[in-house]
Amino acid sequence: TAWMAVYTPMPFPTDIDRTLAYRGRALYDDGCASCHGTYDTVGRLTSFPNWEGDIGTDPARAALLTPKIADAVNGGLFGQYIDARTVDTYTAPPLTGIWSSAPYFHNGSVPTLWHLMRPDTRPATFQVGGHRYDLDRVGIDLSPPDGYVPWSIPATVDTTAFGLSNAGHEAEFTDLTDSDRDALLESLKTL
């Protein structure tokens, strides 16, 4: 985990509203940092709690990581870098570079950070692969312009399929206004 102290992700490719991001940082510090880690003023991870628990996301992948599979991972090519273990829940990841890692959740079932923060708007299906990036909603562009040709053959994410539910992580956004969510989104662009 020493790499996290020196890793610098690519910066967000367009302008960030620094005033809005500053307000969003306070929201992040109050509601997200205890699970996803704290960041300094330049967006570098300074502490990581390695929080593990249940936030209502699809449990299928955790259930499928059996001791036999964990042993195979640990003894394989990546065993020197990964220490796989079986768990009943998920560990909250650090959010360094999150703007560039869509789709979201451990199973890729949420196309943008905007949708993650607005659970009632999460689409049941969407395309991945060869997609355009939505820099406003931060993630996969669900409405590419007419005539757009994907650069690879897209696949459909169907959130009704086994292991692909887009449920979970709803309570964290319940008390936030749309303005708060926009500020938090702007702040996440800085990580």
Image: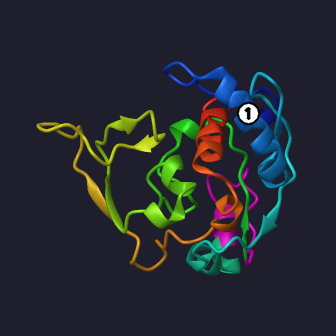
Callout 1: SS: helix
In magenta stretch: residue 179 = no
State the image quarter where residue 74 is shown.
bottom right
Residue at horizontal 48%, vertical 66%? 120
Quarter of the picture containing the N terminus is top right
Residue at horizontal 65%, vertical 63%? 73
Residue at horizontal 44%, vertical 53%? 111
Residue 120 vs residue 112, the one in the foreground: 120
**Which x, y percent locates residue 105?**
57, 59
**Which x, y percent locates residue 190?**
66, 28
In magenta stretch: residue 78 = yes
Q: Which residue is mark 1?
A: 23
Q: Write the start and end of the magenta stretch as one range.
A: 70-88
- Residue that extends furthest to the top in the rendered view of this protein: 15
Residue 58 vs residue 67, the one in the foreground: 58
The vertical placement of 117 against 4, above or below, is: below
Quarter of the picture containing the C terminus is top right
Dominant SS in magenta: loop
